[in-house]
Amino acid sequence: MGKFFGTDGVRGRAGEFPLDDATVSIIGRSLARHFAARLGRMPRFVSGRDTRESGLAIESALHGGVTAEGAQISSAGVITTPGVAFLAGAEGFDAGIVISASHNPFEDNGIKVFLPSGKKLDSDIERLIEGDIEDSSLEPVSPIAPNEDLAEGFDEAYLESLRAAADGVSLAGLSVVIDCANGAAYDLAPKLFRSLGAELTVINDSPDGRNINKNCGSLHLEMLAAKVVETGSDLGAAFDGDADRVLFVDRQGNVVDGDATLWILAGEMRANGKLANRKVVATVMSNLGLEVAFKGAEIELLRTKVGDKYVLEELICTGSEIGGEQSGHIIFPERCLVGDGMATAVLTLASLARRGISLEDAAREFRRYPQVLLNVVVKEKVPFEDVPAIMEAAAELEKELSESGRLLLRYSGTENLARVMIEGQDQADIEKKAADLAAVIREALG
């Protein structure tokens, strides 16, 4: 990762460096300048934002910087992250720029850039922008209010692409509760699912700039589950603040996460001859039960490090057709290189309607293995392989688990924590095993 750009662009506290007006305008100038150098002409950008109160100010500062260099930039207004990525390719822009901090609280915000292919901005341009920020070679400029003249047309183009994902299947007769997280999907999602015929109950669709992701959306499913049960709906779907992910609950209010969604969609793809290499990509955090279920269906589960970036890399490398994370961030490379919660929801609901089955029935053959996750505070993150006591204990534990369980031992990326995750067939057994290994780590590194 760079000094300002992480794996998901620039992210931080809104109004503070590097998301203060002056720095954002420099980012805009730098982005325009380096794209112009690469393209041999002035670039055309499209931007969009979620519902955070800081979004308009950041987008205005960005527009000021871009236009100061002579480049063109249009705004799609409030729109999802995958919506901006879609527009970048479909409407002939050179890049799409998203102002969002996804599932983070309203105080945070971020900037991420997508190329027309759907891939994120490459690291060489990110390093050039970081250099421009550090050496003060570009002066900040005044903000400019975003031009949203084409926003309504952009919305309709994006919604039409999502309707196409249903492949002509009507959702009539399906009662659905959707939780818009008071975020970017608050207006688009109800329009989409009503246009496909679903009987809708909508919650958390009244953003005030500060309630995005607040006790709602895909990180907080309690309200959705209660509303599904209360209304007797068939299922519920919850998006996060920028709607690049979706999680479901069934009619009993049980959570159907990204692992189960992969199982449902990959299974239908295979039945329809659309899973050519019989491989699905997931991360090391996906439940062992998913691997076991896929093995029984003669589908291989490929695991990557945590992060949609790594899932996408493996999808492209192996030519696989579906991949994702437990969080509900699902990617279909043939359709788009960006996870899209609304597209995933359309595909899932259309699958249920086409097959005439309930969500719980579709997920039934995927049996989740019990899981325990312990965090152990450590003084420093010494490589585990350099600590014989830890390696010996881990090896003995893996031998005991054999093929009926799984150990994942890793460090937190942001804190001095060792994470012990064990899956197995018996909850009490894996809790004891995890506690024993945690004690060894605490003794060696605590």
Image: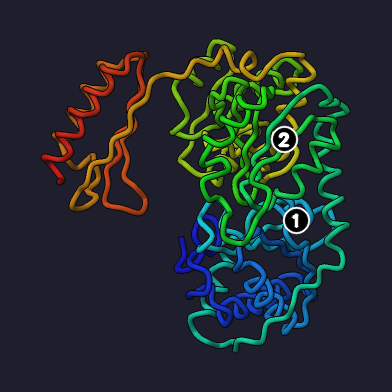
- Helix, strand or loop at disc 2? strand
Residue 89 drawn above or below residue 175 = below
Residue located 47% across and 65% down the image: 2
Label 1 Cα neighbours within 10 Å, binned few <14 / some 14-19 / many ≥20: many
The numbered mark, 1 or 2, whose residue comes first in the sequence reads 1
Residue 257 in view in this figure: yes
Residue located 52% across and 69% down the image: 14
- Helix, strand or loop at disc 1? loop
Residue located 47% across and 41% down the image: 306
Residue located 63% across and 51% down the image: 182
**The disc label shown at residue 32, or none:** none
For this orientation, the residue located farthest to the front is 230
From the image, tell me which residue sits under label 1. 116
From the image, tell me which residue sits under label 2. 201
Label 2 Cα neighbours within 10 Å, binned few <14 / some 14-19 / many ≥20: some
Closer to the camera, 4 or 173? 173
Residue 48 drawn above or below residue 20 = above
Image position, residue 37 (x, y; %) = 71, 75
Left or right, 170 with respect to 81, comes to right
Residue 81 in view in this figure: no
Image position, residue 365 (x, y; %) = 56, 12
Q: Amino acid at mark 1?
A: Pro
Q: Amino acid at mark 2?
A: Thr
Which coloring applies here?
Answer: rainbow
For this orientation, the residue located farthest to the left is 443
Left or right, 3 with respect to 388, comes to right
Residue 269 drawn above or below residue 190 = above
Residue 271 drawn above or below residue 381 = above
Left or right, 144 with respect to 218, comes to right
Judged by depth in the image, the label closer to the viewer, 1 or 2, is 2
